[in-house]
Amino acid sequence: MNIGYFTHAETNVRFEYAERSYEERHRWAAGFHQKILVQDGSRVARILKTVAYVCVDEDEFGLPVIEKWHIKKHRVL
């Protein structure tokens, strides 16, 4: 179930996001409580008011690789 959406400030692409389940949050990337819905699935994220920290990959040690996205038009449903 989607709980909100935002627009990426640089690309003007709109993304919807949902909450991760309790089990998902404690399995990998524990501080990231949301998931952004993208064409090929989803990306684990921590979405704040004007920025989103998005796990875009995994390094050789199994740790998340994080990108900071500046966002606008953030709405919580």
Image (cartoon, grey):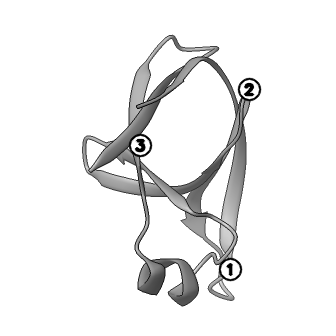
Question: Marks 1 and 3, how far apart in space?
Answer: 22 Å
Q: Amino acid at mark 3?
A: Tyr
Q: Amino acid at mark 1?
A: Leu
Q: Quadrant of residue 13?
A: top left
Name the mark on residue 63: 1
Q: Amino acid at mark 2?
A: Thr
Residue at the location (74% across, 26% down)?
50
Q: Report which residue position mark 2 lands on.
A: 50
Name the mark on residue 17: 3
Q: Quadrant of residue 66?
A: bottom right
Q: Vertical placement of 57 versus 15: above or below?
A: below
Q: Residues at badges 2 and 1 in contact (C-beta under 8 Å)?
A: no
Question: Marks 2 and 3, how far apart in space?
Answer: 15 Å
| Side (left or right) of 70 relative to 13 | right
Q: Residues at badges 2 and 3 in contact (C-beta under 8 Å)?
A: no
Choose the circle earlier in sequence order: 2 or 1: 2
Q: Vertical placement of 56 versus 72: above or below?
A: below
